[in-house]
Amino acid sequence: MTFIYPSVIKEENGMFKGFFPDLDKCTFEGKDINEAIDDAQAVMYDYIRVELTEEDTPVLPAVSDESELKLSDGEFVRNICVHFRYTEGWDE
């Protein structure tokens, strides 16, 4: 399954920091934008993994419309995509 959620990112003091408006307490950061996006993908993957595999009744939040996000000065939106293989017993 492929999941895509918008993230809000801002450069602060030489670091890129961000969060997912739809995923509670999901924050990330990196020394550059690529490292921040890599961290964002890892955090988002962990959030989805926990929700789908450890919750009795998994509920993933709806995806916000990018145009409806309220941004502060210097913030910008990037859609982050992760692939999650949700198949029990799958050996790679």
Image (cartoon, rainbow, N blue to C red):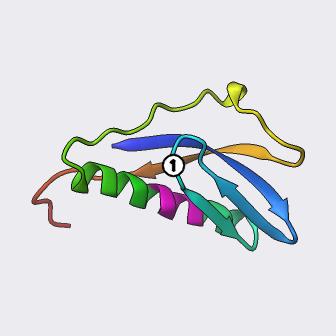
Q: Which residue is drawn at 76% across and 64% down?
A: 16
Specify few, some or many for label 1: CA neighbours under 10 Å numbering under 14, 14-19, or 20 or more.
Answer: few
Left or right: residue 68 versus residue 54 is right
Residue 22: tell me if it is visible.
yes
**Residue under label 1:** 24
Q: Residue 38 placed where, x, y %?
A: 58, 65
Q: On the rendered image, what quadrant is the N terminus found in?
A: top left
Tell which of 88 and 69 is nearer to you: 69
Left or right: residue 42 versus residue 73 is left
Tell which of 72 and 33 is nearer to you: 72
Q: Residue at x 32, y 38 (%)?
A: 59
Quarter location, residue 89: bottom left
Quarter location, residue 6: top right
Left or right: residue 9 versus residue 84 is right
Q: Residue at x 73, y 52 (%)?
A: 9
Q: Residue 88 placed where, x, y %?
A: 13, 55
Q: Residue at x 28, y 52 (%)?
A: 85
Residue 84: tell me if it is visible.
no
Q: Residue 15 placed where, x, y %?
A: 79, 70
Tell which of 55 and 17 is nearer to you: 55
Left or right: residue 80 versus residue 44 is right
* Numbered range of the magenta stretch: 39-44
Check if residue 2 falls in the magenta segment.
Answer: no
Q: Residue 40 placed where, x, y %?
A: 57, 59
Q: On the rendered image, what quadrant is the C terminus found in?
A: bottom left
